Image (cartoon, rainbow, N blue to C red):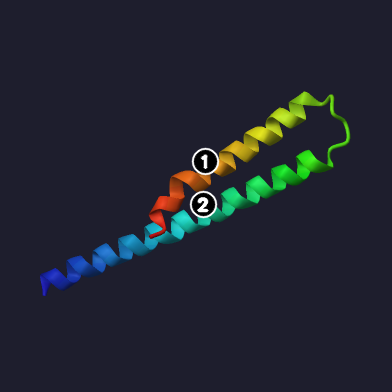
Amino acid sequence: MPNDREDLIEAVNNLRTTIISGFIVICGVLMMCTSLVCIITTKNSLNFIDYGFTFFVFLVGFSFCCTNVKNLD
C-alpha cells in the first residue's frame, strides 16, 4: 500500500512539472511572436533601444522554450 502512495505522489509531481513547463513554453512562444511582430512593423530604423529591448524579449522567450521543452516528455 505505501508503494502505491509513492507512485501517486510521483505521478502528481510529474504532471505538475509538465503543466508548468508547458505553460512556460507557451509564454515563451508568445513572447517570441510578439517581439518579431514588433520588429517587423517598426518603421523607424534608428530606434536602437526599442530594437534592443524587443530582441531581448525574443531571447528571453527563446530561452524559456529551450530550457523547459526537455520537461515535456
Who comes first in sequence, dot 1 or dot 2? 2
Disc number for residue 11:
none
What's the CA distance linking mark 1 and mark 2? 10 Å
User: Which of 31 and 3 lies nearest the eye of the viewer?
Assistant: 31
Q: Please indicate whether residue 18 sits to the left or right of residue 55 in the image.
A: left
Residue found 63% across the figure and 40% down from its top? 58
| Residues marked 1 and 2 touching at CB (< 8 Å) | no
Quarter that holds the N terminus = bottom left
Quarter that holds the C terminus = bottom left
Residue found 58% across the figure and 43% down from its top? 61
Up-down relation of residue 1 to residue 49 (above or below): below
For label 2, the SS is helix
Label 1 Cα neighbours within 10 Å, binned few <14 / some 14-19 / many ≥20: some
Disc number for residue 24:
2
- Quadrant of the rendered image containing residue 9: bottom left
Amino acid under label 1? Ser
Up-down relation of residue 6 to residue 44 (above or below): below
| Residue 28 screen position, x and y as percent | 57, 48
Q: Please indicate whether residue 56 sits to the left or right of residue 50 in the image.
A: left
Amino acid under label 2? Ile
Of circles 1 and 2, which is in front? Answer: 1
| Residue 14 screen position, x and y as percent | 33, 61
Up-down relation of residue 6 to residue 55 (above or below): below
| Residue 48 screen position, x and y as percent | 77, 25
| Residue 18 screen position, x and y as percent | 41, 60
Residue bearing mark 1:
63
Label 2 Cα neighbours within 10 Å, binned few <14 / some 14-19 / many ≥20: some
Residue found 51% across the figure and 48% down from its top? 65
For label 1, the SS is helix
